[in-house]
Amino acid sequence: MALATGTGRRPSTLTTLWRSTVGKKAAMAVSGVVMLLYLVFHMLGNLKVFFGPGDLNGYAAWLRTVGEPFLRYGWFLWIARCALTAAVVVHGVAAYQLSRRDLRARPQKYAHQRQRATYATRTMRWGGVILALFIVWHILDLTTLTVNPHAEPGHPYQNIVASFSTWYGGGIYCVAMLALGLHVRHGFWSAAQTLGANNPRRDRTLKVCANALALVLTVGFLSVPVGVMIGVVR
C-alpha cells in the first residue's frame, strides 16, 4: 500500500480530498458560494450611494461596530476580510491546479462537440484572471486609497465619486463587472453540478437562476459608476 510521505504517515482525509479532482471542484464550489453571498451583500450596500453620503457613510461606519461589545471596533470587518481572502485563495488555487491537470490530461484539442464546454472554460479562466487583477486595483483604490485621487479616509461616498469621476476608474470597474457577470453565470451552474443540486427536472430552473443572478449583480454593480459618470451621484 502506497504511503504519502517518507515518514510512513498516511495523508489526512482533508489532504486526500484536496488532491483529488472531485475535492478541488468541491472546494471551488463552496468558496464560490461564500464569495457569491459576499457579492450580494456588497452590492446592496453599494446601492446606498444613491441615497446620499449620509446613508453610505453611515452604513460604512456601522459595519465597524457589528458584534460590539463582544467584538471590538472594526474586528467584524477584519474577520470578514480574512474569510473572504481565504475563499479567494482557495478558489484561485483550485482553479489553477484543475486547469493544469486538465491541460496535462488532454494532449490534443477537444472534439468539435466539446467546443461549447471549451468556450465556457476559457471564459471562466480569463474572467478569473481579470477579476484577480481587479481585486488588487479595487483594494488600492477604495480600501487603502493609494491610487484614489482626492481620497478622504472614512468617507466612502466621496471616495467612490472621486474614483469613478475619472475615465480609468470607472472604465476599469465596468470591465471588471462585465467579467464578473459572465463568471457568476458559468460558476453558478458549475457549482450546482459539483454540489449535486442539478438534475434533468431542475436544470432549466438553475439556468434561469444563474442568468438572473448574473444580470442582477452586473446591473447593480454597474449602476454605481454609471450613476457617477452621468451625474446622478456627485
Image (spheres, rainbow, N blue to C red):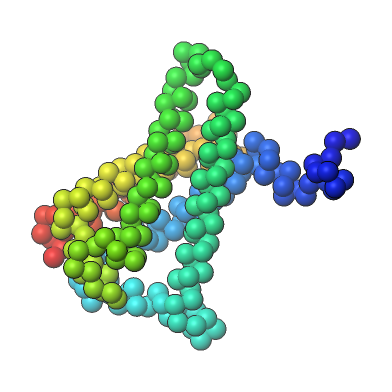
Whether residue 51 is visible: no
| Rendered location of residue 199, percent (x, y) | 57, 34
The residue drawn where x is 13% and y is 65% is 234
Q: Nearer the viewer, residue 50 or 70?
A: 70
Outermost left residue: 231
Whether residue 148 is visible: yes
| Rendered location of residue 132, percent (x, y) | 41, 47
The residue drawn where x is 49% and y is 76% is 75
Depicted 51 relative to depicted 90: above or below: below
Outermost top residue: 112
In which image quadrant can residue 73 be found?
A: bottom left
| Rendered location of residue 214, percent (x, y) | 37, 44
Asked whether, in this view, residue 167 is left or right of residue 35, the answer is left
Q: Nearer the viewer, residue 10 or 201?
A: 10
The residue drawn where x is 57% and y is 42% is 94
The residue drawn where x is 55% and y is 26% is 103
